[in-house]
Amino acid sequence: MIQGFFVTGTDTGVGKTLISTALIHVLRRLGLRVSGMKPVASGCIDTDYGRRNEDADRLLEAANVSADYDLICPYRFMPPIAPHIAAQQEGIDIKTEQILQCYQKLQSCSDAVVVEGVGGWQVPIKEDQFMSDLAVEAGLPVIIVVGVRLGCINHALLTAASVLASGLPVAGWVFNQLDPDMQQLDAVKQTLQAYMPGTMLAEIPFQDDPDVEAIARSFQLSK
């Protein structure tokens, strides 16, 4: 039974939120109650409803479980910089225990929780902890979003190797074309299919305005 996934990427800006929201739609179609979670977010804005984050907003909108915003995104920082640096600037200690408590509360009212990481797999969240440590504590299978552009093969294989070294399984990966002029696209895809663990869950061509519903329909994921 699917309990959820941890979505990471080969870098920042590779489409983690897009894939996470599409994945929520996929799981909802399987008849599941699904929550989204963005444990740590930078680049937030102050609103009439408090400090908000665009990625967390999109996860909340996609989900079919009503949850408090502080559970969905417990740590929110203003500057769009690495979270551990943003936390240091604001004098905040990111506590993994608090994040896990929020995750467990979401888990208790959901069939599945889609947790979106920040940046890549090894982004620090505090002096002695990384985003990968949080994924290990949650114990969720990992989906890797491969931002397809020059250098992506190396980034994808290094990310996958690090995930496997942590003891977590790679549930699959997504081929997300970022460069519209990417050369030898088919050869790159074939190389990734030959070396990446798990299956390619979706292939997303370059899109100026991605269609989340269409991406969800293209996913190869079963209950």
Image: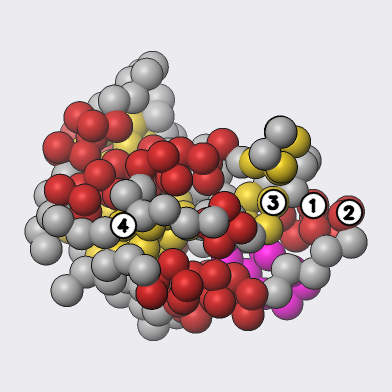
Task: From the image, state whether disc 3 or disc 1 is nearer to you.
Answer: 3
Inter-mark Cα distance, 2 to 1? 5 Å
Circle 2/circle 1 CB separation < 8 Å: yes
Circle 4/circle 2 CB separation < 8 Å: no
Q: Earlier in the sequence, mark 3 or mark 2?
A: 3
| Relative image position of residue 145 (x, y in whole percent) | 37, 48
Q: Secondary structure at mark 3?
A: strand
Q: Nearer the viewer, residue 208 or 216?
A: 216
Inter-mark Cα distance, 3 to 1? 9 Å
Which of the 4 quarters of the picture holds residue 215?
top left
How would you rate the neighbour count of disc 4 (Cα within 10 Å): few for under 14, some for 14-19, many for 20 or more?
many
Image quadrant in which the N terminus is located:
bottom left
Q: Amino acid at mark 1?
A: Ala
Q: Secondary structure at mark 4?
A: strand
Q: Earlier in the sequence, mark 3 or mark 1?
A: 3
Q: Residue at position x 29%, y 42% from top?
A: 22
**Residue 34, labelled with which disc?**
4
Q: Which residues are magenta?
A: 122-131
Q: Amino acid at mark 3?
A: Arg
In this rendering, position of residue 207 left or right of residue 74: left
Which of the 4 quarters of the picture holds residue 149?
top left
According to the picture, the residue beneath numbered tag 2 turns out to be 89
Q: Earlier in the sequence, mark 4 or mark 2?
A: 4
According to the picture, the residue beneath numbered tag 1 turns out to be 86
Q: Residue at position x 87%, y 55% from top?
A: 90
Q: Residue at position x 21%, y 54% from top?
A: 27
| Relative image position of residue 67 (x, y in whole percent) | 47, 56
